[in-house]
């Protein structure tokens, strides 16, 4: 049993980190009243932008020369954050400035983001004349997935807690920082006021449009790091079109599961990561193949159960921001 946990828990954590980035970014966004269903597309754009930056940096290095570790990490991260930021600005321009429907805009951005990633990913694959439909950025991935050198000497403790790349610890730090800012700072208080009742917040002198723009863009940048993590750490630097699966949607489901609390997302993302790969540990064989598909549904079933329970209890702290998904018309104040 202990050997099973030592093998299963690290895989669940690695699987859950993209979900943690995505859910943290979406929680920050939704606290401002913006419902961004484009998170899967944002994660996709963040990933491909990081891949593009890393690709051109790797191919600019003369043969036989070593890569600069700082640049190998900095270039894809900056490209990822810029790409995600542009997606956030686009979403805000459509929903805050033009007051477009948030649900339709988010779904359109998901479609656009996936298409954007597949187009440029396919272009890079053709550029290198690869025999397989993928790009391998193993040199850059090595810097992202590098763990503490002393982790192997600490036995089970090192394997469970210290055997991950820096983006794993950054995800936890960002989630905890977001939780603190939302609940214990004046900025968080203003943000929650904007999400609950923008008319009242506006009357109190809070710039509603500014808070919506800034927090949505920050949320998109956080979510974009989840896409970069998936490629550079989880997938070992290999980009393949349509390889993300439904992780973006799971991140949105995680927001409901954690009732809009970033600190709970840390453990919940690891739980979802474990549930996501649980079917891999089910006995194989023709008699069990149909059950594997049922096990893949577990994260979504759990989310539905939580949604039903929170709806029945009707506690205010378990509900989403009151103005979530609604455009703010100042003239109607």
Image (cartoon, rainbow, N blue to C red):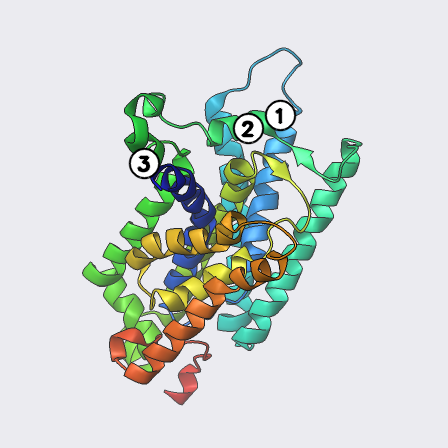
Q: Secondary structure at mark 2?
A: helix
Of tags 2 and 1, which is closer to the observer?
Answer: 2
Residue 277 horizontal/vertical position (percent): 50, 51
Q: Which dot marks residue 58?
A: 1
Res. 173 image quadrant: top left
Nearer the N terminus, badge 2 or badge 3? 2
Which quadrant: the C terminus? bottom left
Residue with the mark numbered 2? 140
Query: N-terminal of the two: label 3 or label 1?
Result: 1
Point 48% across, 27% down: residue: 143
Between the C-alphas of marks 3 and 1, the distance is 30 Å
| Position of the N terminus by quadrant | top left
Q: Position of residue 101 (x, y in %)?
A: 55, 77
Identify which residue, 14 or 103, lies in the foreground: 14
Question: SS at mark 3?
Answer: helix
Give the tally of numbered discs: 3
Q: Which residue is mark 3?
A: 161
* Residue 158, quarter of the rendered image: top left
Mark identifier at residue 167: none
Check if mark 2's residue and mark 1's residue have beta carbons within 8 Å: yes
């Amino acid at each position: 049993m202990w050997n099973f946990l030592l093998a299963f828990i690290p895989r669940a954590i690695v699987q859950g980190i993209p979900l943690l980035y995505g859910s943290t970014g979406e929680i920050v966004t939704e606290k401002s009243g913006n419902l961004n269903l484009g998170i899967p597309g944002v994660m996709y754009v963040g990933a491909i932008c990081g891949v593009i930056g890393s690709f051109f940096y790797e191919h600019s290095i003369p043969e036989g020369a070593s890569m600069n570790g700082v640049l190998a990490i900095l270039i894809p991260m900056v490209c990822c954050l810029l790409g995600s930021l542009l997606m956030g600005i686009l979403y805000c321009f459509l929903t805050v400035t033009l007051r477009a429907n948030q649900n339709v805009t988010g779904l359109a951005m998901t479609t656009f983001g996936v298409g954007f990633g597949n187009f440029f990913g396919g272009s890079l694959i053709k550029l290198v004349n690869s025999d397989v439909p993928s790009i391998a950025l193993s040199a850059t991935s090595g810097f992202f997935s590098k763990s503490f050198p002393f982790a192997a000497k600490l036995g089970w403790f090192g394997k469970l807690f210290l055997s991950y790349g820096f983006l794993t610890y950054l995800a936890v730090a960002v989630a905890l920082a977001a939780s603190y800012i939302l609940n214990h700072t004046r900025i968080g208080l203003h943000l929650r006021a904007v999400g609950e009742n923008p008319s009242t917040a506006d009357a109190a002198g809070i710039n509603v449009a500014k808070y919506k723009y800034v927090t949505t863009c920050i949320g998109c940048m956080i979510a974009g790091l989840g896409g970069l993590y998936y490629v550079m750490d989880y997938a070992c630097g290999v980009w393949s079109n349509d390889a993300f699966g439904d992780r973006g949607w799971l991140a949105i489901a995680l927001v409901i599961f954690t009732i809009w609390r970033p600190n709970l997302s840390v453990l919940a993302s690891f739980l979802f990561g474990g549930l996501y790969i649980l079917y891999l540990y089910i006995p194989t064989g023709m008699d069990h193949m149909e059950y594997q598909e049922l096990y893949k549904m577990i994260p979504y079933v759990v989310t539905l159960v939580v949604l039903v329970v929170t709806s029945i209890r009707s506690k205010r702290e378990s509900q989403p921001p009151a103005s979530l998904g609604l455009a703010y018309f100042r003239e109607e104040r």
